[in-house]
Structures are given as structure tokens and as C-alpha cells.
Amino acid sequence: MVKWKVILFLVVIVILVGWLAAFWIGLPKRTSVAFGSDLFHERYQEAAVMLRPPSALDVDSDGGLILVDKAGRVTNVPKNMLPFKVAGGDGGPEHDLRMMALGPSTNGILDSPPVTLYLSGGGGRITIEAVE
């Protein structure tokens, strides 16, 4: 009887360890998806909480965004360029995710160059690698 209890206990432990490993492995992807969703839906305070310093995101008085990348470079994105959208594919070999703010267009041609945000994630936090 005790033998079955030990086996059951070990099975439960193995299942818990497997669940914890799956949770930990999937955390960066879930964080990237949540961050992208928050930026697209203009929930900037929620997105800012996910950033790893020195990366930062703040809303200026005109409703635009002030972005600070990991090197400390500050970029202002005017309100008429927002929202950011997840760009197709991945962020390339150096970045996990790429997002773009396209802004207004005339006859399908952008009125100004897009703003591209290069992001990387890890440990449940997002780093703004660069803003172009």
C-alpha cells in the first residue's frame, strides 16, 4: 500500500515539474504577445510595466509616445503615427519581435517614414533594443 503512495507522489511531482518547465519556456512568448497587444490597443501603462530598464515608454502631453531604448536613446513618436502593429515575421537574428507605427497615408503611400521598434524578451520582461 505504501508503495502505491510513493509511486503516486512521484508521478504528481513529475507532472508538476513538467508543467513548471512548460510555463517557464513559454513565458517569453506570452510576454511578447501581451506587450504587442498592449501597444496595439494603446494600453501604454500596462506595456510600460513589462519593460526591463533602461528601456522605457511614456505618454507625452500631446498623446504621443516617448520611447527609450536599451542604449538610452530617446525617440518621440507623434500621436498621428500610432498605434504600433506587429510586423510580419520575426525581428531578425538579433531581435525577438518587430513592431511598426505606420501613421497616415495618402492613396496607400505613407505620408512619413514608419517608426520601427525592435524588441527582445526574456524572463518575462521586454527590452527595447532599438527604435528607427
Image (spheres, rainbow, N blue to C red):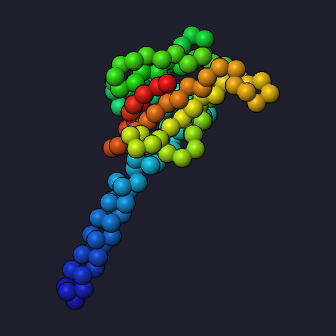
- Residue 115 in percent (x, y) is at 56, 25
In terms of image quadrants, where is residue 38?
A: top right
Give the side of residue 58 with respect to residue 14, left or right.
Answer: right
Q: Quadrant of the N terminus?
A: bottom left
Residue 45 showing in the rendered view: no
What residue lies at 60% left-to-right and 36% top-to-bottom? 85
- In the image, 48 versus 114, the foreground residue is 114
- Residue that sits furthest to the bottom in the current view: 1
- Residue that sits furthest to the right in the current view: 107
Relative height, residue 37 to residue 60 (above, below): below
Residue 86 showing in the rendered view: yes
- Residue 53 in percent (x, y) is at 34, 27
What residue lies at 41% left-to-right and 40% top-to-bottom? 95
- In the image, 36 versus 112, the foreground residue is 112
Give the side of residue 38 with respect to residue 67, left or right.
Answer: right
What residue lies at 60% left-to-right and 11% top-to-bottom? 62
Relative height, residue 57 to residue 39 (above, below): above
- Residue 111 in percent (x, y) is at 70, 20
Relative height, residue 17 to residue 91 (above, below): below
Give the side of residue 90 with respect to residue 82, left or right.
Answer: left
Relative height, residue 28 to residue 2 (above, below): above
Q: How many marks?
A: 0
- Residue 103 in percent (x, y) is at 66, 24
- In the image, 51 versus 132, the foreground residue is 132
- In the image, 38 versus 115, the foreground residue is 115
In terms of image quadrants, where is residue 23?
A: bottom left
What residue lies at 20% left-to-right and 86% top-to-bottom? 3
